[in-house]
Amino acid sequence: MTHKIAILGASGYTGAELVRLIATHPTMEISALAANSKAGQAMADVFPHLRHLDLPELVTIDEIDFAGIDLCFCALPHKTSQEVISALPKDLKIIDLSADFRLRDPSAYEKWYGNPHAATEMQKEAIYGLTEFYRNEIASARLVAGTGCNAATGQYILRPLIAAGVIDLDEIILDLKCGVSGAGRSLKENLLHAELSEGYHAYAVGGTHRHLGEFDQEFSAVAGREVKIQFTPHLIPANRGILATAYVKGDAQTVLDTLNAAYDDEPFVVVLPLGQTPSTRHVRGSNFCHIGVVADRLPGRVIVVAALDNLTKGSSGQALQNANLMLGEDETAGLMLAPVFP
Amino acid sequence: MTHKIAILGASGYTGAELVRLIATHPTMEISALAANSKAGQAMADVFPHLRHLDLPELVTIDEIDFAGIDLCFCALPHKTSQEVISALPKDLKIIDLSADFRLRDPSAYEKWYGNPHAATEMQKEAIYGLTEFYRNEIASARLVAGTGCNAATGQYILRPLIAAGVIDLDEIILDLKCGVSGAGRSLKENLLHAELSEGYHAYAVGGTHRHLGEFDQEFSAVAGREVKIQFTPHLIPANRGILATAYVKGDAQTVLDTLNAAYDDEPFVVVLPLGQTPSTRHVRGSNFCHIGVVADRLPGRVIVVAALDNLTKGSSGQALQNANLMLGEDETAGLMLAPVFP
Amino acid sequence: MTHKIAILGASGYTGAELVRLIATHPTMEISALAANSKAGQAMADVFPHLRHLDLPELVTIDEIDFAGIDLCFCALPHKTSQEVISALPKDLKIIDLSADFRLRDPSAYEKWYGNPHAATEMQKEAIYGLTEFYRNEIASARLVAGTGCNAATGQYILRPLIAAGVIDLDEIILDLKCGVSGAGRSLKENLLHAELSEGYHAYAVGGTHRHLGEFDQEFSAVAGREVKIQFTPHLIPANRGILATAYVKGDAQTVLDTLNAAYDDEPFVVVLPLGQTPSTRHVRGSNFCHIGVVADRLPGRVIVVAALDNLTKGSSGQALQNANLMLGEDETAGLMLAPVFP
Amino acid sequence: MTHKIAILGASGYTGAELVRLIATHPTMEISALAANSKAGQAMADVFPHLRHLDLPELVTIDEIDFAGIDLCFCALPHKTSQEVISALPKDLKIIDLSADFRLRDPSAYEKWYGNPHAATEMQKEAIYGLTEFYRNEIASARLVAGTGCNAATGQYILRPLIAAGVIDLDEIILDLKCGVSGAGRSLKENLLHAELSEGYHAYAVGGTHRHLGEFDQEFSAVAGREVKIQFTPHLIPANRGILATAYVKGDAQTVLDTLNAAYDDEPFVVVLPLGQTPSTRHVRGSNFCHIGVVADRLPGRVIVVAALDNLTKGSSGQALQNANLMLGEDETAGLMLAPVFP
């Protein structure tokens, strides 16, 4: 049986990544592609790398007949997303890749995103899309909120450790390095090649990055108490990849054992042997996340490093993994592509 | 039915690319991986991006029992390759990715590669592996010689035009820009990141690049007379990709029509509408080749540009396409992966 | 004696490059910096790499008192430039870095730039700023038109060869590879890091690039007959650099001798020994141009390759070289900075 | 008066960077360049970007007559350096850029570098070359040990804070991101462009990086007690640059005030306004170090970020700054080059 898929916001990078992945999915078929600003164009004109595929023309969202759609990916900007999704049929399965349904608390949403939420009822209904930790809820969900790509990476390191109580909850530092595509296809001076390549810098320093809203919500829920981490992202001149370096206090072997226990049966999360750490280049273009643990020379200090591809495991790959669950397919269908190196 | 595959020279980039592609091939299974210098190591240690795959350990070539192997890819350096292949079972299907069996004439081989050929009988037997033009011969071949990656790109532009006699055979210039991975994983100062990135240059200028041996052989055979082109490669600070810009004399529409006629039914070679030209970024990581034709402002001059990924369509993807033919599989099996962009 | 300098359009890359170079110039002082869109800001906020300099605040052009200015660089977009320069004091020495005064023929300007010229009188007065060939005229000029960066590179190769009549004037092909900064700091999707890095492509294929207007004008003047070349630029994922590969018909040694004769006494143009070719990485950040000559394997064919930094020798360095002449300074003052490698 | 300079190890990146900087130095002249492995070659062949300079040919160290040399830079690998320097004239002013004389304690040297020191007497004599903190000692020194590039960056952040006692000495984390050129011109697989570009990773994780020897020595001396920090470097796909992100406990305004007090009169260390952080791209190719301070959302936590160019301020620029002091020149002579951006 073939599932008919719609993608809203198909002219952005996460939209294109969904198309790339679905292109070799055994049971999904792309039935509609929407991008209001580029409606009427062929996808091959917007993304020539998808030229070989037989894809529907880009249309406006209004032009889509959702009656025939089995699942809809929504890859729109936040705020737009909640408006669009509110107007979609109430029985349509939806995976939202924006930030709009990640935070369950309307006031937390307003704090981090600056505007009141326009669909607070749906906010409550949405399931947080970190597959490995919400698998069952996702399988039966109607609306799944894809996580932030940085938020996913940090949680792969920290959730099991917080849940198991094996690290000091008040002394967690997450220094994160992310590639350029995480900022999307928007026209900003600081995203130009001439500005970005050959240099790197920290941004949103001091605890102002919006993905902290997700960290606060999820870590506090897992811990059963408030947990607030320090989180500093850095922009690196490479297109894909997130490398998160976590500084925690605990015992390295215990940290490793805890992560191994959490991910032993997971198809996409790989824990390396003690002392080894991952590289973004080795997960590039794939749905894998590699995690490594090292004991610091200072007793009781541990460094945990995780790497994933922000567009795949951090966004569109995660979304497809969730879609597989929601549609009753094998969770790994279409997602076993090996990383592209070099 | 599953075909058992061996890869000799698995610690290089073309070897790793073969593994990447075969990883999602429906009917191939990797049974042996050889790399004499790294025998005894796990493939995951040599190429951590392949860590998620269940692969055999690297062994020496001598350790492989070829009785159970259906097809062997040989991704060794030239000269080594002819020695190794000479000693393999005479009924083993082999695809050689080195330069050793591309040139049918022993003296041409010696001229371009500097050493006399050690297996001239096999040289005669080998089929030149440019799939689109040797499809039938490849399907029934025992030994196929993968083409040079630059040589493939130039031929996709020029073979049909030379065959059809629609361009001036004495006025062909091929200015080629290739990515870094084409030089392989060898330790050379000029391949260091600090040397290469942020700069670019021509090399092998003046008609000294070895792939000219292939151009001379193939174009002269197609034309039925000697054809010698000018060919200047340039090294570009990007890992994957070949962009070939051909300057020819003829009529642009006729050139386009000729290319369309040649590639209309081809699954991997895409001819763009008149006036459009391709980019390496839109074929990256895939087996596709995009070709575009533009009329110059000077009457009778035409520019044809082709783009492909040197490791995929230019090498390992081509090899897998040929393997599919040799094993009676669908030619596109395992090769419909969409390009990775951005 | 210190010369007081104004820069109009100081928020773009050529403006910033002028400031970088003038920072260590022994006899120039920056007295005014204008950027209408960023007036009121500190230069350190627009270009933090210039933070250590004691620079005037950005103002609008109207706010500048030109009475105290000895020389004005105009680094504005074309069309804007002619309007602004028309309104400047008639005795002010001006170097325009835009395209507005490069073409002496108003109809040629309109053909290549799409709008009628608004200051045709000044168009006639302006001296073409290719220092090595207009040195005397520049020294006594009031208005100098900086050349196109691609146009400069091509002319360093071809002008002496055309002037000496040592190549076939009807068979000149210039295949050019340029870095990203040549496109300026403008917000265009195709200039984003995620779009550009890791890939490359031809653009303005077929003889539509505007710098052909300069080639046509200059080469025809030098030859005393119409000369039209083929010219195809390619965009390369590096920030700085132009590499021009010229395919000409002639004798390699004669070509080399001609170039040596032309540039023997030039401080910034270096001709390499026969058979060597240059790299953009070796002129990066400097005012040097390296040129190499190679005989092709085909008799009578020669390849000449030139490399320079588009922002320095191709634009702001050239402008400063011209300013030195116009102000009676040593032509090399402030320009002997060594290239930055790696 | 012109100072005659010798550079030993002129075929590496720090050697080339010294030549680049000295090229525009008003009172230094390069009299001898040694590189044993490339003796007999012209510097222009080893580093074509220095082609325009009139430089002596590369010789072996033995060939140099040190009688006429005023100051000698030694840019050799560690261990080789101590052997070579031991044999140089005892009254020759020397700046060593290797690690050999950074650690004053022979056992600390052996611990971090794995071999016993062969010139322990000179080890005691050598002055640690962090100009801003050893200015007077350097001015009268005969032998100065250039600091590690990472060690310099970390100390610019932490030395004043430790000295002033404004941060918790037991809770210092330094997460550092460095460019590729820091690893030198050595032939290692992991330094190839195809391996490095487009990806990034942590290395020497857990407190094993040798520059920790410097941190331990200097911070403990400054504090008057043992201070051991956590330090994790990451390799970033850019050629130049170090970005250090320090996580400390204290008060942000106090931290800022302390840094401002320390660097107010320094020509090369720039402290940004509270809340701003630096980028490596804005110090590239220059001798400047930019430092920024941000208060974290968690009370009592502060993030301090520093950026410098590892080859300039982190190594050869620092060395030249020290040479100026040792020779009685203006400390900034030859070092006021503006950063190169883009």
Image (tube, coloured by chain):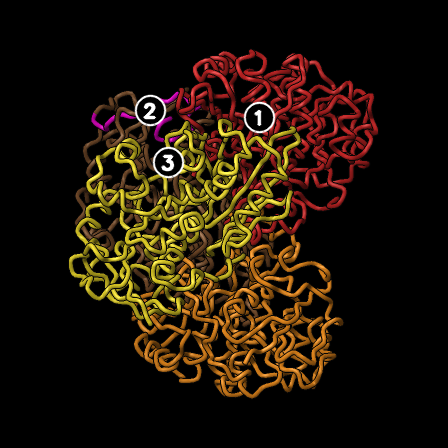
Chain colours: A red, B brown, C orange, D yellow
Q: Amino acid at mark 1?
A: Gly
- Start-end of magenta stretch: B42-62
Q: Position of residue C270 (x, y in %)?
A: 37, 72
Q: Position of residue A36 (x, y in %)?
A: 76, 42
Q: Which mark is residue D217?
A: 3
- The residue nearer to you, when weighing D309 against A23, is D309
Q: Residues within 10 Å of mark 3 (few under 14, many from 20)?
A: some
Circle 3/circle 1 CB separation < 8 Å = no
- The residue nearer to you, when weighing B210 against C39, is C39
- The residue nearer to you, when weighing D202 against B280, is D202
Q: Residues within 10 Å of mark 1 (few under 14, many from 20)?
A: many
Q: Amino acid at mark 2?
A: Ala
Q: Position of residue B78 (x, y in %)?
A: 25, 44
**Vertical order, A206 against B235 (above or below):** above
Which residue occupies 32% across, 25% down? Answer: B70
According to the picture, the residue beneath numbered tag 2 turns out to be B42
For label 1, the SS is helix
Please, which chain is the residue tagged with disc 2 on? B
Residue C202 in the magenta stretch? The answer is no
Mark 3 vs mark 2: in front: 3
Between the C-alphas of marks 3 and 1, the distance is 34 Å
**Vertical order, B224 against C171 (above or below):** above
- Left/right placement of residue A47 relative to residue D61 reads right
Quadrant in which the C terminus of chain B appears? top right
Whether labels 3 and 1 share one chain: no
Residue D62: image quadrant is: bottom left
